[in-house]
Amino acid sequence: MTALPLVFDAPRRGKPPRHLADLTREEARAAVADLGQPAFRADQLSRHFFRGTTDPAQMTDVPAAARESLTSTLLPGLLTPVRHQAADGGRTRKTLWRLHDGALVESVLMRYPDRATVCISSQAGCGMACPFCATGQGGLTRNLSAAEIIGQAVAAARAMADGDLPGGPGRLSNVVFMGMGEPLANYARVRKTLEALYTPAPHGLGLSQRSITVSTVGVVPGIRKLTEEGLSVTLAVSLHAPDDELRNTLVPVNTRWKVAEVVAAADAYAERTGRRYSVEYALIRDVNDQPERADLLGKLLARRRAHVNLIPLNPTPGSPWDASPLPAQREFVARLRAAGVPTTVRDTRGQDIDGACGQLAAADLAEGVPSVAVVPPEPVEPPVELGAEADE
Ligand code: SAH
């Protein structure tokens, strides 16, 4: 099959159709009333949505005659699975989703003995341009709506409940915003998503805040907003270098928010929540893995409420960089620990299906055509969008 049908099929880019998960409860009740239905149907629909029920025939608590209009108006299918890829004996599953306008995003579900984590995307593509990250290379296509982000978690919860991954039926316990995109550059929708993730049924998935991790390049105003709003989700900051000079090249947004500002914002968040934040550091051979950098990082983070999570670089196509060799990794860990900084090395799941950190590019469509060829990026959008006003 060629890519042409997809190109022609792709409707004009724009806002996804209205969805219950994007509305406030009042708006949802009003929308249901507009269809001549009692307001409590909004709660029923919400329960079905968060349970991952997509077939109107299964919504037996809703009168048959009303199911079609209610679901087509408030629960349009926003995520179409293009394909699943499995790794790690089936315990890791990556899904490529097509959105209403042809944009593509990926999510990865990982089952462990004691938990199940889904890694979700908050944007199609990413505007942060980190040179070692596959997603960063294609640029930003667009922000996802809250319903598009929440839908990835709901699908994962449903897959767990249905026992789609080996080990029988289970429960989704964790969500990490470590898929495509910069969550704090899509603040209002991510905020709405967080609420849906931790709110109990029927209006959410009922996860605990600490089992939800928001990972950011260091969008300082976004970290401050999380702090001001009194959230207690786990914060992860992608530092990758302890010094501005190197960080400017690895995380270009560092020219806007420097290392000192980023850790200060994360400190304030940790102060507020009483919990450690995680510092992510992709170990890149001969780039940021020198013993001196470990010492510098140790000095920076000692006595802060921080935990370092080292990620051996997952090499991405076309990148000249490689993961640090094991002895360099060990030395790095030892020096950080000697400085009193709790440090772990991340287990990288799904490497063989390009499902590991930083590998999500949605560039390998079934048709073999990169997503950017299907959906060209929109004309200039501000890379960082903050505040509900700017968002909608
Ligand atoms: N925009 C968010 C989420 C990105 S993905 C952020 O930057 O935090 C989650 C983590 O994977 C980030 O720490 C990111 O820097 C890291 N990452 C990206 N590319 C990687 C790669 N090729 N190898 C290892 N980690 C990578």
Image: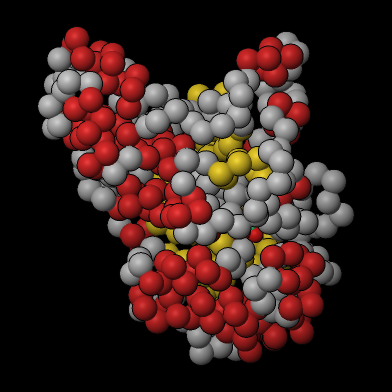
Q: In which quarter of the image is the N terminus?
A: top right
Q: What residue is shown at x 79% (from left), y 67% (from top)?
A: 249
User: Can residue 265 be seen by looking at this rendering?
Assistant: yes
The answer to whether 46 appears left or right of 361 in the picture is left
Q: Where is residue 350 in the image (x, y as percent from the top left)?
A: 60, 43
Residue at 46 percent of width and 37 percent of height: 148
* Residue drawn where x is 76% and y is 47% of the image: 137
Circle count = 0
Q: To which quarter of the image does residue 231 belong?
A: bottom left
- Compared with residue 308, is residue 37 higher up or lower down, i.e. above or below? above
Image coordinates of residue 61 in percent, x first then y, are 14, 21
Name the residue rendered at 30%, 57% in the picture: 208
Q: Could you tell me residue 82's position as x and y percent?
A: 57, 23
Above or below — where is 193 with respect to 292?
A: above
Asked whether the viewer can see residue 171, the reply is no
Q: Can you say whether 144 is above or below 39 in the image?
A: below
Q: In this view, does 86 lie to the left or right of 318?
A: left
